[in-house]
Amino acid sequence: MKRFKSLWDRLLFRDKGIIPTKKLLLLYCLFFIAMLVLSFWQFSWLFLAIATILMIALLTTDIFLLPKKIEIAVERNVEKEMERYQKQTISIHIHNRTTDDYFVRIKDGIPTSFQTIFPQGQKIPAEQKLRVTYEVFPQIRGDYLIDKLYLRFKTKFGLWERQITYTLLNQVKVIPNLSEAKRYLASAQNYLLHEGIKIRKMRSGVGEFSKVRSYVVGDDPRKINWRQSAKLQDMMTNEYEPEHGKYLTILIDCGRMMGVELEEGNRLEKSVEAAITLATAALHNGDHVSVIAFSKEIKAVVPAGRGLEHLNTILQSIYSVEVDAQESNYALAIQHAQSIQRKRSMILLFSDVQTFVNEDYHLFYMKKLRKKHLFVMIGIEDQLLHEKIKRKPTSALVTMEKSIAQKQYIYQKQVMRKWEKHGLPMLEAPADRLAVTSVSHYIETLNRGLL
């Protein structure tokens, strides 16, 4: 049984060895058919023995032409950091030190959470190098070790394949998707205007004066700089931006309810990506950002820092956080946030709104928190609940489901309004709008001078 398992491992690119190809099996079948046809006529056993020996010699000669491990040098080039749901290219360099040409097939020992298609057979000329590339599509954040590389070589006759296993250690980090953050850095105004759903224009003259620029259609006429317009003979306008140096504390819930699956990933994945986008906006604005990831216990803490270089510190601290099968301890997270942030700050919690608001004892901690800090909670909308509300009552069962969904939705809104009366606003957004909703609320808070 162990011997069979070892042979099976070799066929599955798990070990080293020599295996026959389809071409060899085809030649063997043709030889067997030829001998079977000749058997209808009389021929000596000596002829059969000589023919068999010659056939075996022909088939086995190809084995001695296959390369050895020391004759082939390989190297793998891979990025140390990869973004989730972003294609990355891995290159394999193969150096043929022999005087013969070979055909090679590659299968890399990448993790199962990486989607990929390996290239087909490649020809590697004698005494030359071959560069083979393929793309991977990482889907789960975390640390991964790529250690094994499997190569199968065959000669131009193509009767046998030799599998050689190389050990090449490469440590890879899969970090959250940064596409939203990159879009914000590319053009913050376009990001907010085209993606925002609850964006309010900045009040005239509010915030710090930034610069004078050319007037474009859509700008507030009240901000036109008439002195500069007359001097330059062109319409110019003042541009303002929120005050810098504020403090933002981001809390990321990693509890049980954050493991609810969405169309792409789960709630925690979207919350982490939204938190990074929000941190990018705040750091780009010159504010201080601290991050706390928690579930039943504190999982990661990033003290307040300033500047875009602090974003890498946040990434390295929270890129591997996972969902715990436990209820979250909100009181512990809030107390820890207050202990590391003594100054007045905006505390934004990414969590499940329904779970949070249904616990009345949370309101006691929030009232105390509200005396010094500005608290905001944001969660992902229950897509299934909204789909049931929008359904047409075509049957008694559908009508009952729609009625229950509407009742649940109304109750949730009533509880959220109750919290808002105490100065604790709560927001819900679709999964694909979570990042832009949090950023727009942060910018609006600064523009209104609430922080």
Image (cartoon, rainbow, N blue to C red):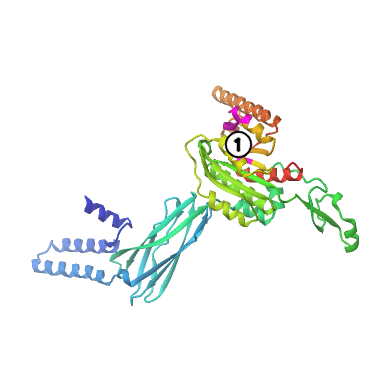
Q: What residue sits right under mark 1 in the picture?
A: 381
**Alpha-carbon neighbours of circle 1 within 10 Å: few (<14), some, or many (≥20)?**
some
Residue 284 picture location, percent across and down: 68, 54
Q: Quadrant of the C terminus?
A: top right
Residue 186 picture location, percent across and down: 67, 57
User: Quarter of the image holding residue 392?
Assistant: top right
The magenta-colored residue range is: 348-364
User: Quarter of the image holding residue 154?
Assistant: bottom left
Left or right, 278 with respect to 133, comes to right
**Residue 77 is a magenta residue:** no
Q: Is residue 442 above or below residue 14?
A: above
Kind of residue indicated by mark 1: Glu
**Residue 351 is a magenta residue:** yes
User: Quarter of the image holding residue 385?
Assistant: top right
Q: Residue at x 68, y 35 (%)?
A: 370
Left or right, 153 with respect to 60, comes to right
